[in-house]
């Protein structure tokens, strides 16, 4: 029986890297890269890297780590090899960090979204990983969301007929929540990047920015709220026969049929809301399971860096239109 475990290092011990699960230690949810690898028996979480000494102490104790380093330079000097390296550092450090850890020749880099803080660096990262034969998987988490996959299957089977429009609302910035939103759309439409077009600015004021674009002939209305006091991430799909809503980032889904109005003749209305629990909070563990499958089979991921790059390219296009 093969008991070999794949060796993992996590760069960055902030919320996504490690702290979400330390702050929510009583929760059974897997909310951080460290926790996802720590709980998966296929992996050996060996090391974390962070300049914050207090975080390193907490993380080492919580995850029973063998090694911790306060810099990538220190990690490189250790000459330890890793199968997977997670990048959970601030976005503007991604390019420099990945350029450094390429020297360790990991088989997979699992990078928090987006790939980089700008499209130029994102392109360089994708190219670097390809040239060094390193798999690049970006944590656009909804690609592992089973409820979203169910919606996509129903869409492809024509259960939902004639998509008329899509309404999107989010906050916390275009590169943060916005990149998740754009990647979700790309995933739903089979990464058909070229069909997203005609991006235009409708309005931009102190409270929100309104964008309109098209997927093929379907209009997409995007509202970017500037109030970040509470998380906002919603998509409404308006079909001829249904309205489908992804709420609270995918924690809740709502389905309403278009039905005949029992009170007014020749009038159509929506039926009552039917809510279903979403699965977005299970996605990180599923992403890590996907990584183990790739390593075991020595195969390529269906979520290559190029799809994440296309998401960032579309975000960059929207950002330029807003700034101009």
Image (tube, rainbow, N blue to C red):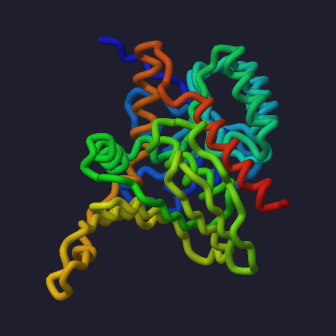
* Count of marks placed on residues: 0
Above or below 288: residue 112: below
In percent of width and height, residue 73 lies at 81, 31
Query: From the image, which quarter does the C terminus lie in?
Result: bottom right
Question: Can residue 208 be seen?
Answer: yes
Examine the image and state in which quarter residue 76 appears.
top right
Residue at left offset 70%, top offset 15% = 132
Residue farthest to the right, as pictured? 324
Where does residue 252 sit, x and y in percent of width and height?
Answer: 35, 64
Q: Residue at 44% of width from left, 66% of height from top?
A: 248
Quarter of the N terminus within the rendering: top left
Depth order, front residue of 223/15 = 223
Q: Residue at x 34, y 62 (%)?
A: 244
**Does residue 24 appear anywhere in the picture?**
no
- For image coordinates 77% across by 61% down, the residue present is 322
Residue 310 locus on image (x, y percent):
64, 37
Q: Find the residue positioned furthest to the left.
A: 262
In the foreground, 173 or 137: 173
Report whether 235 appears left or right of 92.
left
Check the image and report above or below for 191 versus 210: above
Relative side of 20 to 294, left or right: right
Height in image: 261 above or below 240? below
Task: Point out residue 177 in the picture as x, y percentages from the top left corner.
Answer: 60, 58
Which residue appears farthest toward the front when viewing the image? Answer: 266
- Compare residues 222 and 227 and report the one nearer the observer: 222
């Amino acid at each position: 029986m093969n008991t070999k475990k794949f060796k993992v290092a996590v760069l960055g011990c902030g919320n996504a890297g490690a702290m979400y699960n330390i702050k929510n230690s009583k929760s059974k949810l897997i909310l951080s890269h460290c926790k996802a690898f720590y709980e998966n028996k296929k992996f050996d979480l060996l090391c974390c890297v962070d300049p914050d000494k207090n975080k390193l102490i907490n993380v080492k104790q919580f995850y029973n780590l063998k090694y911790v380093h306060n810099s990538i330079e220190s990690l490189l000097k250790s000459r330890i090899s890793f199968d997977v390296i997670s990048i959970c550092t601030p976005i503007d450090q991604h390019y420099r960090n990945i350029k450094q850890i390429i020297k360790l020749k990991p088989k997979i880099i699992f990078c928090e979204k987006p790939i980089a803080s700008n499209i130029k660096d994102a392109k360089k990262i994708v190219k670097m990983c390809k040239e060094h034969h390193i798999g690049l998987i970006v944590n656009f988490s909804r690609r592992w969301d089973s409820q979203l996959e169910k919606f996509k299957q129903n869409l492809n089977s024509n259960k939902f007929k004639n998509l008329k429009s899509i309404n999107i609302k989010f906050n916390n910035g275009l590169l943060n929540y916005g990149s998740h939103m754009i990647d979700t759309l790309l995933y739903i439409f089979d990464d058909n990047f070229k069909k997203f077009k005609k991006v235009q600015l409708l309005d931009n004021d102190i409270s929100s920015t309104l964008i309109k674009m098209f997927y093929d002939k379907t209009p997409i209305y995007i509202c970017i709220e500037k109030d970040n006091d509470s998380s906002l991430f919603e998509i409404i799909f308006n079909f001829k026969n249904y309205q489908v809503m992804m709420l609270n980032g995918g924690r809740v889904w709502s389905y309403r049929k278009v039905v005949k109005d029992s009170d007014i003749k020749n009038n159509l209305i929506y039926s009552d809301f039917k809510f279903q629990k979403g699965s977005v909070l299970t996605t990180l563990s599923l992403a890590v399971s996907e990584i183990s499958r790739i390593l075991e089979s020595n195969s390529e991921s269906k979520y290559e860096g190029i799809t994440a790059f296309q998401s960032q390219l579309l975000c960059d296009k929207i950002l330029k239109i807003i700034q101009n």
